[in-house]
Image: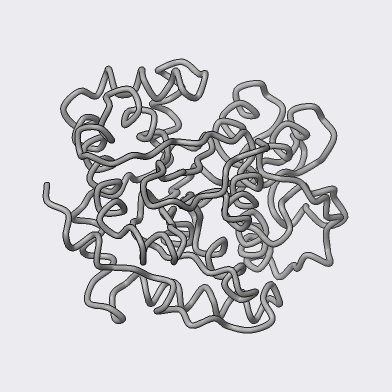
């Protein structure tokens, strides 16, 4: 997506970037039900087809907020582009993974194969964890740098042997008989929490609006609980898949409730989220994905979760 206005004026709508991912689809409910208006905040959901594009827009100050995983927060922060984590939206529990062509029985057979994944992103982190289990490294595979979306498409087209991608590509590959999932985030609990991240200056200048955005998100989660069928239909329409497929995709994640967030943020800087972020920063440094470790506690803004009411 091109030509977004720079996020700036205090009275301008907040720009929140999002790509299609099961754990981020509640924003479509926020839009459909007018929850931004209900909570009294001016905000727009800006939709991208590729996650790297909304990451670039965030880095370029065209967005006030977007969704990331921990690695997405830590890597830019190590280069001076910090974001502030205000909410855990979900955790991948099988919705991210690695698909391999028929005949590739497991991770040990990746050696010498063409593997598509996004260098420096969550896909590389997942792949490295998988290879590590079999005593392999990235040097043992033929790396093809692609976004998760492009990797899934390339795999379905038969252009690569292995792809690190996410739903709906994982299910599509299995459904079409083109391959199978050989590793997923269900094998690595806690590795990939999905986060809503705001720019530091937006938090400083418009903290009340950030609070209202989280309140709108919370309304969408409540709607999913009380109106599951309609909620799934709204999200499925946004993802351009059937309601049945949407339910299958949702089965691969855990949506985090407000109570889940309060528990994970904990008492700063000792909550589970801080510890997970610190461990992942150490892993990224060890894996040479970052040159220096950022100040992890400064990447978390826990005050908003604690102030939301059900």
Q: Residue, x 12% and y 51% (percent of image)?
A: 309
Quarter of the figure that contains the N terminus: top right
In the depicted structure, whether residue 272 falls above or below residue 199: below
The quarter of the displayed image where residue 126 is located: bottom right
Instruction: Tell me: residue 89, above or below residue 140.
Output: above
* Colour scheme shown: one colour
On the rendered structure, is 58 left or right of 212? Answer: right
**Where is residue 59 shown, x and y percent of the image?**
61, 58
The front one of 34 and 7 is 7
Residue under the image location 32 percent in, 28 percent down: 29
> What residue is at 58 percent from the left and 83 percent from the top?
293
Question: Is residue 213 or residue 174 the one in the foreground?
Answer: 213
Quarter residue 179 falls in: top right
Q: In the picture, residue 159 is in which quadrant?
A: top right
Q: Is residue 231 above or below residue 274?
A: above
Where is residue 113? Give x, y as percent: 85, 50
Q: Nearer the viewer, residue 307 or 144?
A: 307
x 42%, y 77%: residue: 298
Left or right, 212 with respect to 138, comes to left
**Residue 141 drawn at (x, y percent):** 83, 58
């Amino acid at each position: 997506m091109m030509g977004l206005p720079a996020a700036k004026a205090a009275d301008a709508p907040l720009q929140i970037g999002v790509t299609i991912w099961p754990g981020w689809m509640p924003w479509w409910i926020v839009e459909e039900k007018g929850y931004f208006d209900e909570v009294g905040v001016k905000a727009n959901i800006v939709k991208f087809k590729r996650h790297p594009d909304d990451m670039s827009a965030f880095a370029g100050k065209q967005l006030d907020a977007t969704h990331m995983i921990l690695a997405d927060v830590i890597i830019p922060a190590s280069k001076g582009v910090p974001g502030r984590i205000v909410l855990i939206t979900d955790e991948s529990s099988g919705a991210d993974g690695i698909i391999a062509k028929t005949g590739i029985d497991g991770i040990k057979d990746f050696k010498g194969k063409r593997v598509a994944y996004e260098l420096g992103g969550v896909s590389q982190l997942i792949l490295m964890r998988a290879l590590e289990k079999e005593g392999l490294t990235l040097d043992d595979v033929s790396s093809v740098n692609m976004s998760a979306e492009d990797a899934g498409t390339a795999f379905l087209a038969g252009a690569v042997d292995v792809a690190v991608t996410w739903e709906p590509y994982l299910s599509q590959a299995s459904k079409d008989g083109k391959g199978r999932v050989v590793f997923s985030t269900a094998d690595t609990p806690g590795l990939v929490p999905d986060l809503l991240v705001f720019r530091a200056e937006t938090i400083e200048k418009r903290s009340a609006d950030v609070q209202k955005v989280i309140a709108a998100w919370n309304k969408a989660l409540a709607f999913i609980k009380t109106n599951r069928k309609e909620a799934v239909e709204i999200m499925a329409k946004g993802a351009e898949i059937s309601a049945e497929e949407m339910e299958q995709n949702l089965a691969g994640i855990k949506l985090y409730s407000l109570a889940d967030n309060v528990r994970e943020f904990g008492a700063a800087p000792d909550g589970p989220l801080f510890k997970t972020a610190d461990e992942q920063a150490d892993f990224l440094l060890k894996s040479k994905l970052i040159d220096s470790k950022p100040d992890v506690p400064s990447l978390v803004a826990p005050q908003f979760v604690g102030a939301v009411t059900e």
